[in-house]
Image: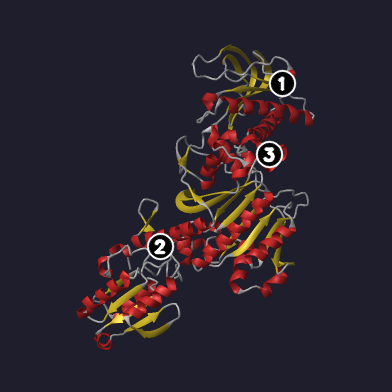
Amino acid sequence: MRVLDVHADHCSFETVAAPPAEDAPDPEEPTPDPTDAPPAPREGGFDDCLVAFVAIEGDDAHDPGAVAAEAADHLLDRADDLRLSRVLVYPCPALGERPSDHETSVACCRALARALDDRGADDGDGLDVLRAPVGWHHALALSTAGHPFAESVTRFTGAVEVQAVESEWTVVADGERRDIETSRRDLDTDTRAAFDLAIDGPTVDHLVARGDGDGQPPLAEPDGLGGRRLLPAGRLVRDLLDDRVHERLLGAGVAPVETAVTYDPSDPEVARLLGALGTVGAYPERGARLRPSARLGALAFLRDVDLESGDCPLRLGETGPEERDGSATTVPTAHAVTADRDAAWDALVEFATLATALSRDCGLGAAPVCYAGGAVPPDRLDDLAAALDRPLLVHRDAAADDDSARVRLEFHDARRDPGDAPHVRLDPGLAERADIAFAGGGNEADGGDEAPDHPVIVDCAPLGSLDGTRRACWDDPPAWLVPTQVRFVTVDGDDRDRATALADEVSAAGLRADVDDRPLPVGERLDRAERDRVPFVAVVGDREADTESLKVWDRREGTERSLSAEGLAALVEEVVEGFPRRERYLPVLVEDGPLWGKE
């Protein structure tokens, strides 16, 4: 909502005509008496008053009451400062950049007038409030007071200021609850570090970790245009992560869907869904923007289908881009649509178990941190800790009147950006705020008239973003995830053919192998293999040809052993069994792959 408020010596209006366009909505019916207080007559005005020219914008649809309340506070302060007791609310769509629909305009103007009238009465100011009806052309007479403080322009979004609250942290483990200080000595080092990160927030080191690290060929690099691009090796890692998430979600009964990735936030329907999600911002212009969350697409999907309680549980998932901090990132998501809170809690536990398994697949920790409303039963948290078989850090606001049943479960690891932690959310009121309802309010088999009107939705980002996971696990990635699983390093140029034949033999087994025969000392090429995180490195020279065995360095265990080509392939096969497979994205010869990254 954009408001131009003017101190006027006189202001009056008269409705002239409704808009002539055929598709224009019917204008608001004038109300000359206070039955719809404050009144909105066909004509009226004040002397010595504050005139509020109001432009209702598309994103005001998320919560007209909150936007109006914020604007009313400002106008009451202005009236008090100017010693005025009369306020005229005048709709002026031309003042805004993203006009809202007629319904939202009427709702916001009514809410603003009511808020001014009610709050003026509460404060004992006895404000007289009048507003012009919405949707009419008006004849306007205005005479301004003309002093330096007579006009101001302000935009209101209805955003709620975040207040610092006293927090309570407890650790649930083995059916017991203890304060965090008492529990620290019993936590392993990684869990303690993750819990400290959740409580104290990220350090400078964690914020720096958002970028690809120095000291090794990167998987991504700046593109020179303010963004980043994935190199072939980085794209391979991301695709493998996507494959693993897809496998895990299918195994959990999640059906893949694809929703739109761009939306116009000023569109009233989009604004309503953003408001339901609590995602409201000041957008600089109209037009398509990358979605702030895949939840937006999922809610739009569920709002448009004929959903009955007998269809639940319904699980949907997709992987697509989202906007974070002004840039795009790829995030796998899943949503469970359930019939009631008990089923929703079961879905939360299932998704939490799934997120834990995915973090383990990637070699990352998953210390669970639960932000729970005051209405969440303690035994639910006990069951969650038991299902995860890990200590659970629980945060509750110290406010005694907290009746929220919302739950947000995050999985922290000291190597991961805390803002990109995998998470599961249960918000009992989300479906109702987003106008997602069961057809007919449930069916007789589910309780007839007593069946719930709205489902309960649980959403999950089981791995965080693929890009964030790639960065977090790169220091010590599992063998299934590295771009090159076996590298053959030649002793001299005559060994190229044999090394290439060995790489082809290993590749034929479904593994990724390459050859480094660049004219550099063997030690330098072994260092490059270490920086490339290659788990198995075999040296190929005359001695290996004579013995028909290879000297293999196992990076995982820090040991060296002698193996045949078949034995090496069998070893790697055993290590990556059960994980996604993809062919290498780069040539077999390292020197032919400059897009790996600069050294």
The location of residue 594, given as percent across then percent down, is 28, 64
10 Å neighbourhood of mark 2: few (<14), some, or many (≥20)? many
Residue 5 in the figure: left or right of residue 572: right
Distance of mark 2 from mark 1, alpha carbons?
62 Å
Does 456 appear above or below 496? above
Amino acid marked by disc 2: Val
Q: Of discs 1 and 3, which sits in the foreground?
A: 3
Quadrant, the N terminus: top right
In the structure shown, which secondary structural element does the residue marked by tag 3 occupy?
helix
Which residue matches tag 1? 36
Res. 220 image quadrant: bottom left
Residue drawn at (73%, 53%) of the image: 374
Do the numbered discs 2 and 1 sit on residues whose CB atoms are within 8 Å?
no
At label 1, which amino acid type do we have? Asp
Question: What amino acid type should be assigned to the residue bearing mark 3?
Answer: Glu
Disc 1 to disc 3, how far (Cα)?
A: 40 Å
Residue receiving disc 3: 444
Residue sticking out furthest to the top:
16
Residue 62 horizontal/vertical position (percent)? 60, 36
Give the structural element (helix, strand or loop) at label 2.
Answer: helix
Q: How was this image coloured?
A: secondary structure
Looking at the image, is mark 2 or mark 1 earlier in the sequence?
1
Query: Horizontal placement of 525 versus 24: left or right?
Result: left
Q: Is residue 578 left or right of residue 396?
A: left
Instruction: State whether residue 369 is above or below residue 458.
Output: below
Q: Position of residue 571 (x, y in %)?
A: 40, 77
* Closer to the camera in the image, 560 or 507: 507
Query: Element under label 1?
Result: helix
Can you give x and y, in whole percent of width and height, for residue 459 in the image?
A: 58, 50
